[in-house]
Image (cartoon, grey):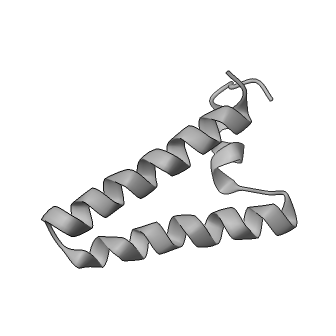
């Protein structure tokens, strides 16, 4: 898998997990969902995402 596919999977998982946590535990988890969304939007404009940098350091191919 490429770094972009990992990124989509991780972002989607974070959103789903935070929605479930906000529903069953505490609604403040929706702030984490918002953080993920803001990060995805800024990466669309700047073409840089911290998670991609982290994944590349782990050796995931680009």
Outermost left residue: 25
Q: Position of residue 10 (x, y in %)?
A: 52, 43
Quarter assignment of residue 30: bottom left
Q: Position of residue 5 (x, y in %)?
A: 66, 34
Quarter assignment of residue 56: top right
Q: Residue at x 54, y 50 (%)?
A: 11
Q: With respect to residue 9, does 16 lie above or below?
A: below
Q: Residue at x 32, y 62 (%)?
A: 19
Q: Quadrant of the N terminus?
A: top right
The answer to whether residue 56 of the structure is visible from this angle is no
Say whether residue 43 is left or right of residue 25. right
Q: Nearer the viewer, residue 7 or 57?
A: 7
So how many labels did they put on this image? 0
Q: With respect to residue 1, does 53 lie above or below?
A: below
The answer to whether residue 30 of the structure is visible from this angle is yes
Say whether residue 36 is left or right of residue 7. left
Quarter assignment of residue 61: top right
Q: Residue at x 57, y 68 (%)?
A: 37
Q: Position of residue 62 (x, y in %)?
A: 80, 29
Q: Residue at x 85, y 65 (%)?
A: 46
Q: Position of residue 41 (x, y in %)?
A: 71, 69
């Amino acid at each position: 898998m490429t770094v972009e596919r990992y990124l989509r999977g991780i972002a989607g998982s974070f959103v789903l997990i935070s929605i479930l946590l906000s529903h069953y535990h505490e609604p403040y988890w929706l702030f984490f969902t918002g953080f993920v969304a803001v990060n995805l939007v800024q990466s669309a404009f700047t073409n840089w995402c911290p998670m991609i940098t982290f994944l590349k350091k782990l050796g995931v191919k680009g």
